[in-house]
């Protein structure tokens, strides 16, 4: 097996830096980005990160966060990557927003042999705090995200108004162990094998409502985060696992003023696929 060494040597981005592509064709091919070692106040926008040894599982990640704080990843496109599109760990990735990105999983080198990329988001930081909002993820087969479950991972993440389409095998969201706490609101799942996947050997926690929302669930949201939770929507997708773990919701009580207030899943479905990705920001 041959591979390009550049895929294993990501470009390092330091503190107080903005990396923004100019025009609709800006990008980096063959190597990813690394934000870590205490780096803070970093913005990555309007890039396509792609073609990082797509035939090789350990051929490189598109974006790595390891001991980083205050990072905004917005309006980028991720495609044809050997391993993870975004990965955190083992150091914390704190105050991170991942928004308006396209994660394109179409690949001829599918580990699940169906043209879908498996490794998408892997969150393993020691104190990860993340917001994932208005991202368009399609043609993948799992780990969107894989959250927690290794080393000393502690993850708290709000997934809000993302659109997930055509996802096979393990589907979309996987929370592992009680140290992973996910609040899942206003997302749209279309043709997704498992909107939330239950990893039975290491079950994690998540709070994810689907229609019809019960009065008790609405009451819990009002009590903990000060408003009603917004239901997720699904069509042509699995219905086997719909967690409403109180501990996952409770993890956001002290941070409720920082939560994104979702629009409806229907509105996300109408807007996100057209607006997400590189080359779509306004000058």
Image: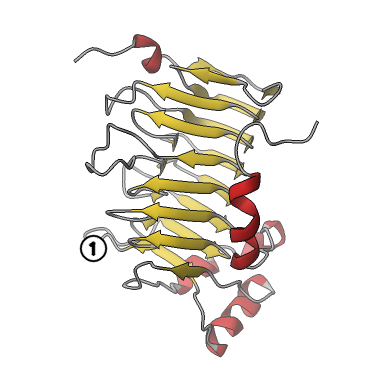
Is residue 180 positioned above or below 18 on the image?
below
Locate residue 249, reporting x and y percent. 53, 69
Is residue 13 positioned above or below 100 on the image?
above
The residue positioned 24% from the left and 38% from the top of the image is: 111
Residue 230: quadrant of the picture = bottom right
Q: Nearer the viewer, residue 231 or 201?
A: 231
Locate residue 183, reporting x and y percent. 52, 63
Residue 19: quadrant of the picture = top right
Q: Nearer the viewer, residue 238 or 152?
A: 238
Quarter of the image with the C terminus in it: top right
Locate residue 61, reporting x and y percent. 40, 27
Q: Nearer the viewer, residue 112 or 274?
A: 274
The colour scheme is secondary structure
Q: Secondary structure at mark 1?
A: loop
Is residue 193 positioned above or below 106 on the image?
below
Can you identify the residue that label 1 sits on?
A: 200
Left or right of 123: which side holds 115?
A: left
The residue positioned 34% from the left and 49% from the top of the image is: 142
The residue positioned 44% from the left and 34% from the top of the image is: 85
Seen as rendered, the residue at the extreme bottom is 215
Residue 134 visible: no
Locate residue 18, reporting x and y percent. 70, 24
Residue 116: quadrant of the picture = top left
Residue 44 visible: yes
The residue positioned 41% from the left and 22% from the top of the image is: 51
Seen as rendered, the residue at the extreme left is 1
Label 1 Cα neighbours within 10 Å, binned few <14 / some 14-19 / many ≥20: few
Quarter of the image with the N terminus in it: top left
Left or right of 40: which side holds 62?
A: left
């Amino acid at each position: 097996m041959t591979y390009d060494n550049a895929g294993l040597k990501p470009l390092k981005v330091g503190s107080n830096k903005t990396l923004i592509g100019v025009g609709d064709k800006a990008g980096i091919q063959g190597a990813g980005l690394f934000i870590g070692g205490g780096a803070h106040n970093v913005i990555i926008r309007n890039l396509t990160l792609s073609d990082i040894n797509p035939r090789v599982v350990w051929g490189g990640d598109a974006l790595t966060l390891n001991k980083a704080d205050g990072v905004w990843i917005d309006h980028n496109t991720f495609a044809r990557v050997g391993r993870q599109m975004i990965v955190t760990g083992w150091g914390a990735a704190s105050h991170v927003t991942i928004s308006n990105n396209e994660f394109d999983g179409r690949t001829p080198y599918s580990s699940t042999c169906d043209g879908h990329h498996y490794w998408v988001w892997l969150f393993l930081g020691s104190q990860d705090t993340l917001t994932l909002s208005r991202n368009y993820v399609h043609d993948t087969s799992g780990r969107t995200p894989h959250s927690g479950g290794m080393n000393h991972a502690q993850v708290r993440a709000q997934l809000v108004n993302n659109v997930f389409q055509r996802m096979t095998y393990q589907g979309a969201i996987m929370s592992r162990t009680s140290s992973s706490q996910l609040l899942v609101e206003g997302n749209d799942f279309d043709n997704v094998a498992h909107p939330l996947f239950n990893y039975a050997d290491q079950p994690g926690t998540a709070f994810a409502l689907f229609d019809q929302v019960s009065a008790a669930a609405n009451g819990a949201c009002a009590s903990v985060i000060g408003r009603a939770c917004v239901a997720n929507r699904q069509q042509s997708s699995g219905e086997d696992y719909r967690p409403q773990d109180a501990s996952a919701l409770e993890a956001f009580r002290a941070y409720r003023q920082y939560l994104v207030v979702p629009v409806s899943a229907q509105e996300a479905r109408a807007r996100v696929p057209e607006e997400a990705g590189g080359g779509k920001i306004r000058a």
